[in-house]
Image (cartoon, coloured by chain):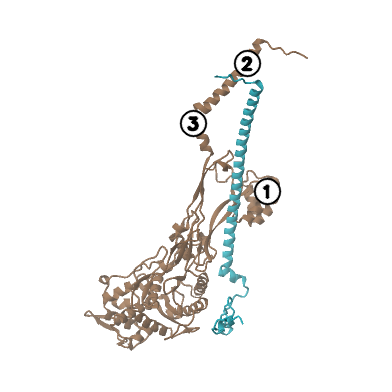
Amino acid sequence: MIQKATLKPWSLLSLSVLILFITALGAITLVWMRQQTTHSASSCKHLEIELHKLEIKSAFLSSKIAQMHNPQYLLSQVKDGFRRPSNEQVIGEKRVDLVRPTIAPTLALKAQSPHVHTGL
Amino acid sequence: MIDAFASRARWCSLCVMASIAFAVVALRLIYLHVWNGEALQAVAEKNRYTFRVLHARRGDIQDTHGNILATTRAVITLGIDPQVLRDPDKIKFPRLADLAGIPLTAVEEAAALQVKASDKTKRPIRWKKLAEGLNDTTYEAILALKIKGVYGNRSFERLYPAGKQGGHVLGFINKEGLAVGGVEQYLDFYLRGQDGWIETECDGKRQELVQYRERQVPPREGCRAELYLDLTLQHIVEKKIEAIAEKYKPLSISIIVSEASGPLLALANYPTYDPNHFSQYSLDTHRNRAITDVYEPGSAFKIVVSSAALEEQVVSLEETFDCGKPTLFYKGRELKLPKNYRTMGVLSVRDIVVCSSNRGMVYLAVRLGEERFYNYIKKFGFGALSGYDGLGEVRGIVHKVKDWDGLTITRLPMGHALAATPLQMHCAMGVIAHRGVRMQPLLIKQIVDDTQKTLVSYQPKIKERVVSEQTAATVMQLLEKVARNTKIRGVPIGYKTGTTQKLINGRYSTSQHVSSSSGFIRSKDKTIVLTIVIDSPEFKGTAYGALVASPYFKELAEEIIHHLKLEPPHEA
């Protein structure tokens, strides 16, 4: 049995308004998304430029350091120049292992039989 | 309230005009979007599309301790556009000149230029260079002055922080960005890296629309090359070269220091140049003379004859020869023997080497025979490329036996009638110092990529065994005796000097000589080989190697022993 659908004027109006609203919202969302994409891309580019600038500065500093490590430059900074120490000035010292103490009492201990708890 | 009235005709005409206007717009839109849409879209895309190359940074070159020998840095070239310059900004010129490190007059002159004097078309000047090589900090300070029309362009610059030191080893990058000579050219494939690119879109002001960036391939930084060269030792050697040049004013000097196993620790020449300012030096100074120039090695070459004779057991150390006789019968002919530098009588083979007797060496060569002697010369590396990690090495000249004239057998043993590079002589001494084995000279230690992964590692490479270990040890002892058993800080040194008259206009000159000294420093851990070649020193009388080169050999040996902390060997 076929029923006739009755469409009241107010529901037609509300449907139209809803369609318009969804369309407008969709359009605004699309624009907003595009703006966000643009914004993110700009931020990325900004960071990219900053990173590039830092890399450039780092390379420049490295080259400056290298120039200052140059023996010729180092010598030019010393007014009277360097002189090699004579043999008498060189003092030999025994190598000291800084990680392990020089006197290790535990290593000097003789092997002992394990302590047995007798319970007495 | 007034009722508006419009006649029907006016209303209709207004409607028609509006419709026509809309129709024109619509037609225009149809033309732009439908009729000619594809072509116009292509034009628009072409205008927006940008392909930008991202240049890769060239890799660094480092010495054995990680000191940077060559690096790439971004610098700014500052310029001015005189057309847009504003008068009120001119009061900032003194500060600008101060920051850019140029005279104020240079800024004022550049600002006053409107057209090129030589240009007949009177085109306006839009860019005049003020300064180059500025760093970012300076540039930012200049930009902060806010002078309209003053701006900079960024470019990459190859920098050699050590200046002249190691210039011949490193080579340089010319104005076109091409690697010229040395390690720069030899390792260009690894050092130059790989450029990247960006495919993107730009707006009308040529500003990138980053959101439309389609493809981005980042550049791959060039690899880092690590050399065996020691910057401090190189400095020591170059200082010594300066001292020699100042004292003797020679045409050229070459000094090579290496480990006996091959790694080159220092290599320097005079005249030299600064690769940072290569264009300010003549092309002649760019030549790495240690590998490109040949000379007659003279008495230093006697190590070849003596080693070969001892190796082949054609003589013994104690066997004697009359070195006072001026002639020798050879193949049915009486050959005139070369003079000794002083009167000599009967000498043992040991004394022939120690006293450097020219005639004695001829006897040894004759005992060896021409073919065998020639083979040993070749085995010691003469007349062939040494395998140096650089470009421009020459082979030198060693004539085949069939091309020898009657006198060659008497001249060759004392290091005449052949031409060798200082490096070849150095490598020959290396054979003696490295227990009779010829090693390939090594300059490059390793090549490391941007992820710190070692791509290529160069290890000491054996070329061939030339003489036995025993023969090499015997010759070493003899050379130590030549050096009068000198020990520096307990470390023995040995050397053989060489003095050759230069061949000028087909005649041996009596005033121009090549003085050389090649030898070794025998320490506990390693043996260092050192060669000094001085071409045409200004010296009263004969510039004997023993008088000119040897003193510097000893001085250098002392500094090398000190720098490398070499310890005395355990004597048997």
* Among numbered discs 3 and 2, the one appearing first in the sequence: 2
Q: Residue at x 59, y 40 (%)?
A: B205
Is label 3 or label 1 in front? Answer: 3
Q: Chain of mark 3?
A: B
Please state which amino acid type lies under the numbered disc 3.
Glu
Identify the image quadrant of residue B442.
bottom left
Q: Residues within 10 Å of mark 1 (few under 14, many from 20)?
A: few
Identify the image quadrant of residue A76.
bottom right
- Chain in cyan, by letter, is A
In the foreground, B217 or B483: B217
Q: Colour of chain B?
A: brown
Can residue A103 be seen by looking at this rendering? no
- Name the residue carrying label 3: B38
- Name the residue carrying label 2: B15
In the foreground, B518 or A114: A114
Image spot of residue B44 (x, y percent): 53, 35
Image spot of residue B427 (x, y percent): 39, 73
Secondary structure beneath label 2 = helix
Secondary structure beneath label 1 = loop
Q: Residues within 10 Å of mark 2 (few under 14, many from 20)?
A: few
